[in-house]
Image (tube, grey):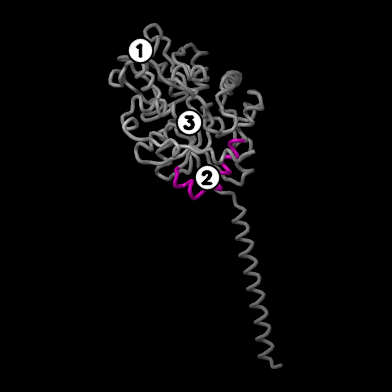
Amino acid sequence: MTYASRKFNRLGKYAFSSILAFGSFCALTQAAHAADPEKVTIMVGGITKLIYLPARLTEQLGYFKAEGLDVELLSQPAGVDAENELLAGAVQAVVGFYDHSIDLQAKGKEVKAIVVFGQVPGEVEMVASKQADTIKSMADVKGKTLGVTGLGSSTNFLTQYLAHLKGIPNSEYTVLPVGADNSFIAAIKQNRIDAGMTTEPTVSQLLKSGDAKVLVDMRSLEGTREALGGTYPASSLYVQSAWLDTHKDAAQKLARAFVHTLQYLHTHTADEIAAQMPKDYYGSDKALYVSALKASLPMYTADGKMPADGPDTVLKVLAGFNPSVKDKHIDLSRTFTNQFVSQVK
């Protein structure tokens, strides 16, 4: 064999080895990418609210990672802001109120709840203690300023409906967006609102300080049925229907993670659950947080499924004051699905 032939063979072997090495590298790279957690960004309409507790608790328990998901939780003070982020494509999912899916369908937008966390709103209409003698029910809000988390938010929907039931049109009171948590408390203390709708643990903080009293309580099934006439599914995980059609595997993983969290909530004490949460959730008064959490535990569903009578009640509430919903045919079957939670053992 000539020198040139031997050299060609050596080069050929080297080239072949290089190709094999490169192929192995590509395979390893592809495998590594396949093993990378799937990124999902979820916007929460007020992440420290107890009604949305499953969002952060699922992260704390490691259930997202167990499903091979890389979930980023973001927070907006009002559900309507979270909804806007979803519609803009900035996030893939929202933890917010189910009623947005009905309101949006009336506006030609399609979103769908795939996990239901709360079978009741968990909302409370609080009246400032200074106004408690003059505002004894929603029939007394004429000429008053009522606080909501944001315009177009679920607190705004519910406020309008409760006033509507008492014969007070929204033209006879003022709605002021004041956010939640500390900003809501400040609005009460600074006399910027006469009453307003908020959730736990803000309710317990206001009751403890004596700055406000309960006017309408929708933290329990009994209170919700009394106020709204039925079960009112509220906090949920919802996504755009178009995204759901092409991301069923991710939706199933999210549903499984959240249902496991709901099961955890029903099999652990308030103290055990609070111990899983970051310290800034309860601050310097952990006892108050635990007390509020204990009172809130019955509102969570055990399986993430939509209550049978829930969608009809929500539609009735929205149609009661919202002409755009009342005048449209709403297909409730397109606003939620139990498909994914039903597959969770």
Q: Is residue 66 above or below residue 153?
A: below
Q: Nearer the viewer, residue 286 or 339?
A: 339
Is label 3 in contact with label 2 (beta carbons under 8 Å)?
no
| Residue 196 locus on image (x, y percent) | 41, 19
- Report which quarter residue 212 is drawn in: top left
| Residue 144 locus on image (x, y percent) | 33, 15
As shown in the figure, which amino acid type bears the numbered disc 1? Answer: Ala
Residue labelled with disc 1: 139
122 horizontally vs 149: left or right:
right
Mark 1–mark 2 distance (CA, rounded to whole Å): 44 Å
113 horizontally vs 147: left or right:
right
228 horizontally vs 56: left or right:
left
**SS at badge 3:** loop
Bounds of the magenta segment: 240-259
Q: Is residue 294 above or below residue 259?
A: above
The answer to whether residue 266 is magenta is no
Q: In the current view of this chain or complex, which residue is farthest to the bottom?
A: 2
Q: Which mark is residue 46?
A: 3
As shown in the figure, which amino acid type bears the numbered disc 2? Answer: Val
As shown in the figure, which amino acid type bears the numbered disc 3? Answer: Gly
Q: Which mark is residue 205?
A: none
The numbered mark, 3 or 1, whose residue comes first in the sequence reads: 3
Q: Residue at x 42, y 37 (%)?
A: 83
Q: Is residue 229 above or below residue 132?
A: below
Residue labelled with disc 2: 40
Q: Residue at x 38, y 10 (%)?
A: 135
**Tag in front: 3 or 1:** 1
Residue 289 visible at all: yes
Q: Nearer the viewer, residue 231 or 80?
A: 231
Q: Residues within 10 Å of mark 2 (few under 14, many from 20)?
A: some
